[in-house]
Image (cartoon, rainbow, N blue to C red):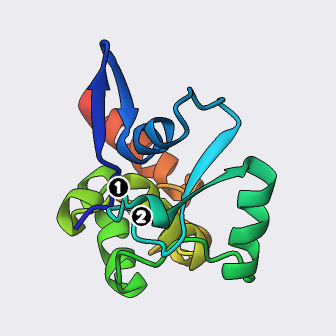
Amino acid sequence: MLKSYKSVWINGKQIRLHRYIMMLYLDRELDSNELVHHKNGNIHDNRIENLEILSNSAHMKLHQKLFPFGKRFEQKYHIDPNVVFEFFKQTGMEEISKIFGCSIGTIQNIIKDNNLRSKIVCKICGEYARYRKSQLCRKHYLQQWYQKSKILKT
């Protein structure tokens, strides 16, 4: 299930529900630098007891205490990098993201975190394959392209 904040429309403006509840409770508009934090971490629990106003810096400090190793959000997708690698050799990131039902950014992070680009090697010489779909390095790709263009011209 995708996490998303509930919103309401007030006078033609969309406002997050938790911010609107806090505005009603305080009987004033919130400044843009005031963040409404859910104390228990459940973004759907909009009871006033669960909401507090924090500055941006205080909010960041709080999350650094809660997630000291930089893992701010739980990992949604548990995708095997080896499977992504097999698809990556043959197709583009957009197609892979559709297969796994995630964003292109998630696929890019898996590729980057597991250094998958450098694992694609030329099927002829074993060097880094710049042209991953054909699994060829630049030299061999250009050789094949030149040979094909020669055949087409004759």
Classify residue 148 by image quadrant. Answer: top left
Relative image position of residue 19 (x, y in whole percent): 47, 41
Q: What SS does tag 2 mark?
A: helix
- Closest to the observer, 79 or 147: 79
Q: Is residue 83 left or right of residue 1?
A: right
Relative image position of residue 120 (x, y in whole percent): 50, 73
Residue 107's disc number: 2
Residue 47's place in the image compared with 29, above or below, is: below
Q: Nearer the viewer, mark 2 or mark 1?
A: 1
Which residue is the site of mark 1? 103
Residue 88's place in the image compared with 147, above or below, is: below
| Image quarter hosting the C terminus | top left
- Closest to the observer, 49 or 115: 49
At horizontal 66% and vertical 29% (from top left) the residue drawn is 31
Relative image position of residue 151 (x, y in whole percent): 28, 37
At horizontal 36% and vertical 86% (from top left) the residue drawn is 80
Q: Amino acid at mark 2?
A: Ile
Residue 125's place in the image compared with 4, above or below, is: below
Residue 116's disc number: none
Which residue is at the far top? 12
Q: Is residue 3 left or right of residue 69?
A: left
- Closest to the observer, 1 or 11: 11
Q: CA distance from mark 2 to mark 1?
A: 7 Å
| Image quarter hosting the N terminus | bottom left
Query: Do we see residue 8 in this rendering?
Result: yes
- Closest to the observer, 2 or 63: 63
At horizontal 71% and vertical 59% (from top left) the residue drawn is 59
Answer whether labels 2 and 1 touch (C-beta < 8 Å). Answer: yes
Q: What SS does tag 1 mark?
A: loop
Q: Amino acid at mark 1?
A: Ser
Query: Do we see residue 126 in this rendering?
Result: no
Relative image position of residue 57 (x, y in whole percent): 81, 53
